[in-house]
Image: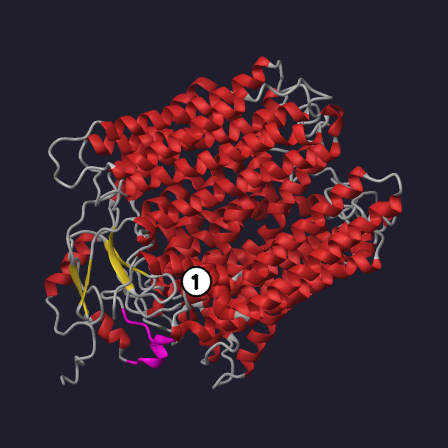
Amino acid sequence: MRRMGPRSNLQGMGTLVFILVGPIVWSVHLTVIYGSQSLLCALNLSEDRSAGNAAVVTIILFATAVCIAAVGFSAVRIRFVHALIARGDPPADQMGFIVTIMRILAGLSILAMFYVGLGAVILPACDQLR
Amino acid sequence: MNQQYPAELPNKGPRPKEEVEELERIWATPKGFKLLTVVNNTVVGTIYIGAAFLFFVLAGILALLMRTQLAVADNNFLSQDLYNQIFTVHGTTMMFLFAVPIVEALGVMLLPQMLAARDLPFPRLSAFAMWAYIIGGLVFFSTIFYDMAPKGGWFMYPPLTLTEYSPGNNADFWLLGIGFIEISAIAGAIEIIVGVLRTRPPGMTLAKMPIFAWAMLIFAAMIVFAFPAVILATMLLELERSFGWPFFTAALGGDALLWQHLFWFFGHPEVYIIFLPAAGLVSMMIPTLAQTPLIGYRLIVVALIATGFFSFGLWVHHMFTTGIPGLSLAFFSAASMAVAIPSGIQVFSWIATIAAGKRPFRINVPSLFILGFLFIFVLGGLTGVMVAVVPFDFQAHDTYFIVAHLHYVLVGGMVFPLFATFYYWAPMVSRKMLSERLGRWAFWLMFIGFNTAFFPMHITGLAGMPRRVWTYSGYLGWDLLNSISTAGAFIMATGVLIFIIDLIRNFRFGGGGPENPWNAGTLEFLPNDVYSTRSVPHVTSREPLWDQPDLAQQVREGLHYLPNAPTGGRETIITSVIEAKPQYLMQMAGSSWTHVAAAVFTAGFFLLLTIKAVAIALISGVLAIVSFIVWGWQLDKPDQGEVDIGGGIRLPTYMTGPSSHSWWAMVIVMLVAASLFVSYIFSYLYLWIVSPEVWAPAGSPALPPLTYPVNSAILLVFGSVLVYRAGKRLPAAGQLHLPLLTPAMLILAAAFLAGSVGVEVLGHLRTGLDPSANSYSAMVYMGSFLTGQAAFATIILCAFACGRLVSKRLYQKRSVTFDNAALLYWYTAGQGLCGLVLIHGFPRVIG
């Protein structure tokens, strides 16, 4: 069994991040849509309320589409994304495990982002609804 | 080939008998009074679990008092004020002093055995966390006996907890006491993350890691990101109570809802912080009891990770009734439902494993508690989905329905697996197993008692009974249901009492108990002693004891890695993160008074501040810092060259940079600090959205001229460059003449850091900005406070590194101390620069 150097530890950290790509993008997505919606609704930036509401919906749908596309791309272009994050391929004997976990997490994250983004299509942007 | 000692094993037998004697001497547990200095994980773990269980019993007694008060209508068994204190201390104790600590304690006790490590990488940190928690916890709990306990509920919402409505020190005990215990929890989390990632045995890749290790890894990572939010919240509230900085006072631009956001950003993940390790324990026990590998190992790993992440997107579901726009509620309602998917994956995986067993599922005490857990937790999960539906939550919010739901989730999801754990893993640390007969009594009484107590609360809640009421009128029709609940609580308590009797009769700490009584497949059931396993096995599967029937014998005879102590001290193998390939031998710390003193004085600092004994608190704080410095001075042992661990592997005994375990620990510390700062940024922006009218330049004095932030930034950048240059000028080992420029550069860099914070504060003071004027001014000074805090720690580390340099304990090849100081310096400088951009840039942009 060979020993491994410092680079393998940084690559290891990169591999952990790679596994978490889906949930990380999901958390960015939630931050962006909740943050922007709260901000726009609180400030009521436009005198014409419908324009403000349209801005909220546009941002949410755009962010959802971009984030879902990013996670989907990561789940398909495994080697490229791993190399981008961890500067190299995952260890060959660990490839199956790492890729499986990453892809299922990506799938769950896409589902969660889709589900969250769906609200923008159904509900008014800023009303309290009670 | 020798039949008894196969040639392919890392070491050949028979091994010299003296090796075991040396291991026993090195890892011996201190006796008598010196037991307080112990760091061995099984001893620390057992004391830690014992303390947490004590708090469970104490908080349980408080619950019985509450149930007695509520048993009949119009009761006055307890006064209203005492009742308020009791429900606050009950909830706080269960969440902060029982649930999280006992899980960390289980991690400390079980992880090294499951990973066949000699110990976790920072044994003194575990012991420090334990003592800090015990001292802080006992002082906090004792407040109930002298009318000093907080009364604001376990979540301490302002404005109720502001000085106007909660005068006296009661609330401060919660804020400073629990804040301090949270630091202890973070210390434990750092230990667990580095332990799981770096002290696994050779061959135990991520794909072969025990599920409990996965669960603990995610648990600890969640603590790193969740706890800083509530630490910031407690800091803000304490500053408002003590100095009048108005973060939560609406009249001055604050907002009480900011507390709810920060608290629940911690509080909701907290539920999963408690549940995930329990789920991990269940995933370890079910395969053994079914005698078959876990079905869906990969899916369970996914479920643990996904639950950990999604739980951070649920906090607003505790705030559905606070007037947030409907679409925002939909985001969190959706996330609340999404988290049910990974939870469901685990439940189905457990059921599938039970069904796939090679033999019928064994019905014994651990399995009874697991089945009880499945029944209760699934019910709690279903009511969780109900309250995730916004319109239903509007009706059920703050009623006994929620009390029922949270107890079904927490008691079902954590307490029942915990009792299964006690019975299942007791043989690992006890000479005798716990009684099957008494255990069955305990289970049935607890199961029947729990459901009798809490199921009726769903109906009481739907009938309109609010939470936290001291008593109720007999005309409301809640009497019978409450009486039934009270009877159930006492039945459940009887079950716990029987368990305690079982412990007293049968639990005897020490080795020599039955070996692997359940025929488990994982490493914690290898033959153990004070030094953990005699040798560290090479792992080739997830259930090594099933797949390698001779493994226990081979390990006992020292035929695997590290059968001895080549450096003559405590040591364990550090392996790589993903593939678990051996990298170096870590020299570990042994027993000491330093971490005990650090815990005592740190507790003294926080608790004395609570009662406003500022001078003694400061003395205690200084003594705590001295204790930490002495503790640190004893670490970082010199390189002892390469040593042979078997299998032709020679490992170095010292490591720096990203391969070093301490580098990883420092990175985690930086993540904690970053989480705290991100929570601060959120708070700043949140209060601006709520009250833009108090923001500069319109509502407050204009910002200081740009020369102040620019000078402050220049100091930070120059200091960072100085630290970098100092790193390039570290002396070589054995260099006779110390280059004085290197420590001088470090001291200058530390001075720059202090100067940077000073310039920033001075600039605002000169504009006449008063931190108690409004929420904006309070937030401005809070930014400097946080950076100043990080700078203070960095300056101490820089001074420490200087001391090591001057005493010739720090040189190019022994530079861990410097590496840590440099990492923290660069982090602090980065945080300082971000703070400057926010404080000086944002108002200019919006103004």
Within-10-Å neighbours for mark 1: few <14, some 14–19, many 20+:
many
From the top left corner, tell me how far across and down residue A9 is, in percent.
Answer: 36, 58
| In the depicted structure, whether residue B208 falls above or below residue B773 | below
Task: Identify the residue at horizontal 37%, vertical 23% (top origin).
Answer: B751
Residue B130 at x, y percent in the picture: 40, 44
Q: Closest to the observer: B225 or B815? A: B815
Quadrant hosting residue B373: bottom right
The prevailing secondary structure element of the residues shown in magenta is loop
- Viewer-closest of A117 and B277: A117
Subunit under mark 1 = B
Which residue sits at x=46%, y=67%?
Answer: B211
Residue B481 picture location, percent across and down: 77, 55
Q: Work out whether residue B226 or residue B430 is closer to the camera in this orientation and state it.
A: B226
Q: Is residue B736 rendered to the left or right of residue B240? A: left
- Tell me which colouring the rendered structure shows: secondary structure
Residue at screen point 73% across, 35% down: B689
Count of all numbered marks drawn on residues in the image: 1
Residue labelled with disc 1 = B213
Q: Is residue B624 above or below residue B310?
A: above
The magenta span reads B537-549
Callout 1: SS: helix
Q: Residue at x 79, y 55 (%)?
A: B390
B384 is higher (above) or lower (below) than B345: above
Question: Horizontally, is B512 left or right of A114 in the view?
Answer: left
Which amino acid type is marked by label 1? Ala
Quarter of the image where the N terminus of chain A is located: bottom left
Q: Is residue A83 magenta?
A: no
Q: Is residue B586 left or right of residue B255?
A: left
Q: Horizontal and vertical percent for residue A20?
A: 53, 61
> Is residue B606 something one can see in this rendering?
no
Q: Is residue B687 visible?
A: yes
